[in-house]
Amino acid sequence: MLPERFIQRIRTQEYIDSNGLLNALQEPSPVSIRINPFRWNRRPVDSEPVQWCTTGFYLETRPSFTLDPLFHSGCYYPQESSGMFLEQVFKQVVSPDGYIRALDLCGAPGGKSTHLSSLIGSTGLLVSNEVIRARASVLYENITKWGVTNTLVTQNDASAFSELEGFFDVILVDAPCSGEGMFRDNVAVNEWSEENTIHCSERQKRILTDIWPALNANGILIFSTCTFNPGENESNVKWLVKKYQAEAVELDISEFNGITKIDHEGITGYGFYPGRIKGEGLFVSVIRKSGNPERMITGTRKKQSFEPVRSDLEVVKEWTTFNADNIIRSGDEIYYVPGRMDDYRILKQSLKLISPGTKICSVKKNGYVPAHELALSDGIRTDAFHKADLDYSQALSYLRRDNIQPSGIPKGWFLPAYNGINLGFCNNIGSRINNYYPVKWRIRMRVPETAGRQVINWVNM
C-alpha cells in the first residue's frame, strides 16, 4: 500500500496523471541494460531500444546477471532506463570538443558514472565519488568492470569539493531523495515519510551549496532525483538558480514520447512518470553557471613521491598502451592516472582517493604481478598475454574462483576469456594454475543446472 499522504499530494500536482501513475506503481518494474560500446557490439535478442539512449535496451524478462560472465566482464550494465536520459543531456548541452573535467558526486552504485565515462571519451577526466565507504567499494568494482580508463574514484563529502574552485566543467548531482520514483519496491515505500521529504530537501540544498564553487563558470550542473516531490525537485532548482543567478537550460524532448516538461516560476525541469514512460520515476534539470570560464586553482609542480622507476615503465610499455607521463607508483602498486597530471596533483591534495586510476600491477619480490583492473582495461595490449577462451561452465568456475584447467596454456600469466572478452588473470606455474580473480568479487551463489538458460542471448548490432 502506498502512503496516504503521498497519494493526496500526487493528486494535487497538475502535471501528473495521478491515476495513471498510481496504477503504474503497482506493476512490475521494466528491466533494462546499457551496452558498453567500447567492449561489446551486440544487442539482446527480442529487445526494445530505450528511445533516449543509443546503447540502452529493454529486456522481456529479468535474466540472472550474477550468472552471466559478460556482466562481470563489463559488456553491459543493468540500469534503470529513465537514468539513461543522461545521454541526451550531455549531447544537447555539453560541447564534445576539448578536455572535459566531470564529477559524478553521488556515484554509487555506478550506473550514471559508467555512462558518463563513455560519454566524455578517453581524453576526458571523470571523478566518480561516493561518500559512504561500503557504497564507494561497490562503485569502484563497477567502474573497474566497465574498463574505460578516464575515471578515478573518490570517497568524500560534498564539502570537500568546495576547495576545488572552478575545477569541473560538468557536475552531476544525482541527489539523495525520498525515493518516490522507486515505489514499485516495498523498501522505498516503507522508508517514506513527510518528515523525510523535508529532510531530503534541506540536505540537497547543503550539497548544492557545497558543490557549487567547484563548477567552472559557464559549466553545467545536472541535478536529478528519483522522486516526484516538488520540494526536492523544481523548488530546489528554483532556489539554486535564484541564489547564484544561474540559468536553467531547456532541452529538446520533442522526439521522446512521455517525458513531462515542468515549468516552475521561470525554471524548467523534466519528469519521468511510470504510466507515461517505460521506466522508474525521475526528475532532471540542467543549470548553467554564469560568468566567464576561469579556473582559480593550480597544482604543485615539485617532484612527487609517486614517480615510477625505470623498470616500472618498462613493464608498463610491455603490457599497456598507456602514456608513460601518466604512470605513477603508490607504494608497491603501479597506476595509470587519467587526464592531466596537474589535475591529479590538485585532486590528490584535496580528496580521499579510493583509486587514482587504472591499477596496472603490483611489485613483488619475484617481479610484477598484473592487476585484475588491467585485464578489464581498454589500455591493455592485445598481444601482451596469452588468452584462453573458456566455455560457459569454465567461465563460471573462474568467476567462483575455482580451479580451471584450460588446455594448451604456456607457463606464466594468461587471460581467461569468455566470448573473446577478458575475465581477469591466471598464472600457470607448471604444477597448477592459480586463479587471481578478486576474492571479494567472486560468485558465491550456487550455480543451478539451468544457469545457461538464465542469461541474455545476443545478436549483432
Image: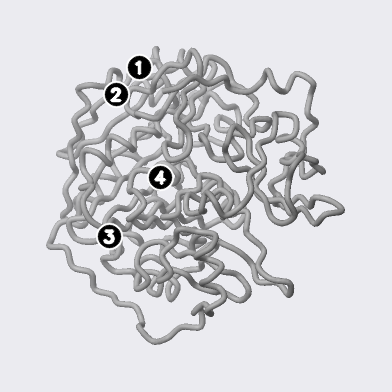
Q: Earlier in the sequence, mark 3 or mark 4?
A: 4
Question: Which amino acid, mark 1?
Answer: Arg
Q: Element at badge 2?
A: loop
Q: Which residue is mark 2?
A: 259
Q: Is residue 99 left or right of residue 408?
A: left
Give the Cα separation between the discs numbered 2 and 1. 7 Å
Q: Is residue 376 left or right of residue 210?
A: right
Q: Element at badge 1?
A: loop
Give the Cα separation between the discs numbered 2 and 3. 28 Å
In the picture as drawn, the residue positioned furthest to the right comes out as 431
Q: Which residue is mark 4?
A: 174
Q: Which residue is mark 1?
A: 276
Report the number of numbered marks: 4
Q: Earlier in the sequence, mark 2 or mark 1?
A: 2
Residue 79 position in % (x across, y down): 49, 32
Give the Cα separation between the discs numbered 4 and 2. 18 Å
Q: Earlier in the sequence, mark 3 or mark 1?
A: 3
Question: Which amino acid, mark 3?
Answer: Leu
Locate the N terminus and report the quarter of the image it occupies.
top right
Q: Disc 3 vs disc 1: which is toward the camera?
A: 3
Q: Are marks 4 and 2 in contact (CB under 8 Å)?
A: no
Q: Which residue is mark 3?
A: 215
Indicate whether 231 appears above or below 105. Answer: above
Residue 260 position in % (x across, y down): 27, 24
Q: Determine the residue positioned at 63% across, 23% down.
A: 455
Please tell me which residue lies in front, 59 or 175: 59
Q: Determine the residue positioned at 51% across, 44% down.
A: 146
